[in-house]
Image (tube, rainbow, N blue to C red):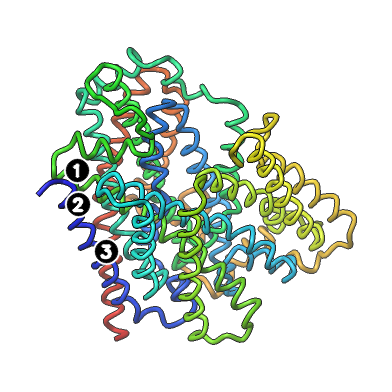
Amino acid sequence: MGTVTISMIVLIILVIAFIGAGIWFKRLATSADDFLLAGRKAPFWLLATAYLGGYVGGASVSGYVGIGFTSGISGMWASLFVVSGCALFIVLFSRRLNYFGRKTGAVTIADFVCARYGESLRLPVAIVGFMRPGFLTGMQFLAIAVVMNIVFGTSIKIGVIASAAIILFYLITAGQYSALITQWFQSVLQSAGIILFSLAAFKAIGDPTTVTNAFYEILPENFVNFWAINPSVFTVYLLTLGLFYLVDPWIYMWSYIGESPKVSSNGMLAVLGGSYYNVLPFLAGMAILVGATTGKISVPEGLTGDALYSWFAIHFTGTAMGVVILVGLLMTIISCGSSFAMNGVTILTRDIYQKCINKKATDKQTILASRISLVVVVVIGIVSALWLPILVPLWVLAQAIGISGLFATTISAWFWRRSTTKGALASTICGGLAAFSWAMMAWVTTGSPGSLVYGLHAAHIGLLVSIPMMIIVSLATKPEYELTEATSYKVLGEEMKTTNLIREEDKQTREGIFGWLGAETSGWKSFWVVVFTIFALHYILSFFFSNQAMGLGMVWIAFVVGVVMIFMLTILGGRDIIDMVKSSKTIR
């Protein structure tokens, strides 16, 4: 049997296994918190691996290979801003949000905003917040369909429906429990696929050192210059792929899931080395370009950048490696899709059903509503994938509307005591509408809502409207100082020191970085030193990639870190899975 046939068989087996896992863990999903947030009990390494599975998606693999092939290393600004925004959020907010969720029962970002400004913000925040998971779920369906079209020859329509069915069937049983368990396995497989694909791309031309040297000898100079990026594009990336994550509904959901505030932050920080899984696709795309330039690889004319990954895996790898790469790619997209689908479910269930339709809903009613919400999210994803041919620009639009409508409102809830409900309402609505209107003008004039018009993106316009609206309207209306403590950054931090909602061993008892991390032993201290050193090198090697020695360092470190992390994710994440299985047996 060939690569394609075996890949199909393996995929079917894995899908059956995912559905079986969901049925197994259904016994744990007995409350709304269980279905939506895995009972707020995700342990350290399971949270870490599942977060990585949701963080690395189809755009982070096949999309980045295409960007590396067409633009070189400067395209990596996109991934660097994403990991920077996520890291900043984790350090600043994840612990306080985890505590806030335990204190108030919060499930969504709207719960946080409404605790400060009242229920009048519920629907505006929910609508703005839902756009991203709604469109991104559809993007994953479409990405899977494209891969299936290239690999298996299925039509895009069949691929979209099949991918939607896969995600629906294994999530509908146990919700977030299903997502966490399967994302652990998917993150391991996707990591192996990225490593093998990148190795194959380099091996097709030579060894990693030889190929890296060829980057500087064969490719245009701007391809190895990290700073060769248009200033307007840079600011768009900064806003929509960087600062956006400070108010991203998806990452707020992840903060609520961890079993403690410390696990919530440390679990996500522990996989910062996973940022190299975003580096390798760019480097692999550049390696393929070297092969195409030297005549060692003949890339078909008209092949899109997104299709380069699947095409190369079929034609330039052996059967076993090709199967792992292709199935790993599909697992990458499925894990990301399930994560965003569950984010959409939390918004529909909590903000629409529980807070607007049935305010006295029982757990049984809420779980049913959650399953219905999952169907709604999947249907919206299918519609997006089949009837909106410009899905990627619409995703960028969703990010732009998200930051425009949520940034000033949410950050003010954290830090600005003088902000008011009317200011927040004006900022959310006007900022979102301004971004949407500018995007529609861009659509009409350029054919894409994500394009720049007069050098400005929808995110620029949205923030230029929303931030002044928050300031002006708040200062013009009566102060609400009595409401500020509910979401005050300072107050929540002080409460965490004395609350009974957090175990004593999870509270910070010492000063300094190691004190904040709770690193009591030399082993944990060494672990965090390695993690932060690797993470810092990501920036240093990127910034100075034009230096050939730095480029070589980036390539080798990316491969080594990627391989080591596979073993860590497999062993440590698997250990948490075993503990959860034992727990499920006791509940039976």
Residue 210 in the image: above or below residue 92:
above
Mark nearer the N terminus (1 vs 3): 3
* SS for dot 2: helix
Q: Residue at x 64, y 82 (%)?
A: 359
Residue 243 in the image: above or below residue 108:
above
Location of mark 2 (residue): 7
Q: Residue at x 39, y 60 (%)?
A: 47
Q: Residue at x 36, y 35 (%)?
A: 65
In the image, taking residue 445 as reference, residue 14 lies left or right, namely left
Q: Residue 387: percent from the left, percent from the top?
A: 50, 53
* SS for dot 3: helix
Q: Residue 42: percent from the left, percent from the top?
A: 40, 67
Location of mark 3 (residue): 15
Label 1–label 3 contact, CB within 8 A:
no
Location of mark 1 (residue): 322
Instruction: Measure the alpha-carbon separation of dots 2 and 1.
Output: 8 Å
Instruction: Measure the alpha-carbon separation of dots 1 and 3.
Output: 19 Å
Mark nearer the N terminus (2 vs 1): 2
Q: Amino acid at mark 1?
A: Gly
Residue 98 in the image: above or below residue 447:
below
In the image, taking residue 45 as reference, residue 297 lies left or right, namely left
Q: Amino acid at mark 2?
A: Ser
Label 2–label 1 contact, CB within 8 A:
yes
Q: Residue 413: percent from the left, percent from the top?
A: 71, 59
Instruction: Rate crowding at label 3 as few (under 14), some (14 to 19) or many (20 or more) other CA atoms within 10 Å.
Output: some
Seen from the viewer's position, the closer of residues 533 and 220 is: 220
Instruction: Measure the alpha-carbon separation of dots 2 and 3.
Output: 12 Å
